[in-house]
Amino acid sequence: MRLCILLTLAALACAAPASRKTRYDGHKVLRLHPAQDCDVEFLEQMRESAFLKLDFWTNPAIGMSVDVHVQPESEEEFISLLQERDIKYEVMTGNIQKLIDDEETSNFLAKAALVKRSGTTYNILNTYARPAEINAWYDSMAAKYSNIASMTSIGQSYEGRDMRVMKISSGSGKPAIFLDSGIHAREWITIATLNWITNEMLTMYGRDAAVTSLIDRFDWYILPVANPDGYEYTHTNDRLWRKTRAPNRGWPCAGADPNRNFATNFGGEGTSSFPCSDIYHGGSAFSQVETANMRDFILSIKGDLVAYISLHSYTQLFMVPWGYTSRRPADYVELDRVAYLGANAIENVNGLKFTVGSPAVILYAASGGSFDWAKDNGIKYSYTLELRPDDKAFNGFVIDASNIEPSGKEVYAGITTVVNNMKL
């Protein structure tokens, strides 16, 4: 048995050839502090610069810190431009590759711990698994808990990967909740967190009164990997890839930002028409097959849906509509009430504070987002959560696997509190 485990661990370590991966040796993350409108305008221009090739981890906004990944070859030029405009900054991370290496090690150790306990790599809990592994695990869990769980495909991604949704239900005809994660490929913690939540619900049904009540009162639809091509690419080629992977005709840059590709205020503020931009909205609303698949499935069950919750990272936010404007929906008081309860429940688990507010007010306007589209289509309680770490962290999207379980526990508390406090 020991030899089998060692061979399995070796296979895990060699799952993707290291030579294919983009490396980030000497790449830095600068934290900027824009103080006036012209600073924000300048940074937005820099974001679109093909020459500097900046990667904005957070978006420019007055009074907010802005994390920017800077390549070694453009560092001197970019810092010079910041100094000319007297935009304050500090170095948060001096070597992104070290963060990625540490995260990879933590994931290897998490997988090794699973193998040691069970002698198999089939379980993915508390690890950063790849799309095929996640689909296989969900299928196995649906078979094991067939009394409440079933799987369906909502379509294939551009590269032909199955987009699978789990339904957790103890009977038909109930109001429904839709959860998704991984819309942005590099936000690994969101997918692992949703996997943890799914496992908690399946394994505790019939054993825990609160979980049992949630499943007996609501149907749950769970899409763990909303951008499977991009997510796989982060494992095999580029850990920091964000978008989908469909080619853009006439451009060397692939993909669009799926969370700018929904129909609500498509192409508006907070998006880009430049295909090489990380916030490129795509050629038209739902031009990406992944968002079109989500649209079609959600519309097919829209009559049952009372809540839509999308998981993103990072900065610890509990966001309420609208994302594209400071204008609020007519029922904003109720949406905010429930959001604050959810944020308080999160804080009660591990002490992490999640700021409640609409993106256009507490951050920046962003159009074409999934939760705005869900709200626009009559799903009353529509939220986006930005998970750990907070906005003071130095590591951003690259987060040790030891964070998965605590993230799962706190986000589960937030989601279930939302659901338990909705007025239907």
Image (cartoon, helix red, strand yellow):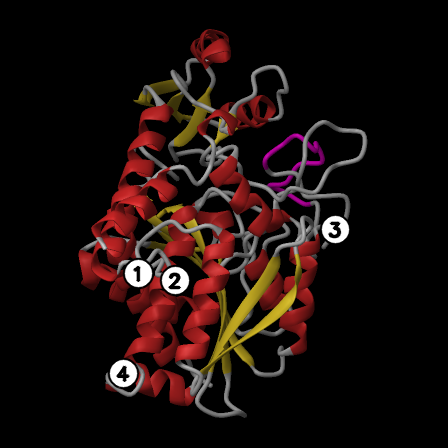
Coordinates of residue 206 in the picture (x, y in percent)? 29, 88
> Are circles 4 and 3 on residues that touch, CB within 8 Å?
no
In terms of secondary structure, where does tag 2 sit? helix
Coordinates of residue 63 in the picture (x, y in percent)? 39, 34
Q: How far apart are marks 2 and 1 (CA)?
A: 8 Å
> Are circles 2 and 1 on residues that touch, CB within 8 Å?
yes
> Are circles 1 and 4 on residues that touch, CB within 8 Å?
no
Q: Is residue 273 magenta?
A: yes
Q: Residue 287 carries which label?
A: 3
> Which one is in front, 189 or 117?
117
Query: Residue tagged by mark 2?
Result: 195
Span shown in magenta: 268-278
Q: Which amino acid does label 2 sit on?
A: Asn
Q: Earlier in the sequence, mark 1 or mark 4?
A: 4
Identify which residue is drawn at 47% across, 17% down: 71
Q: How far apart are marks 1 and 4 (CA)?
A: 16 Å
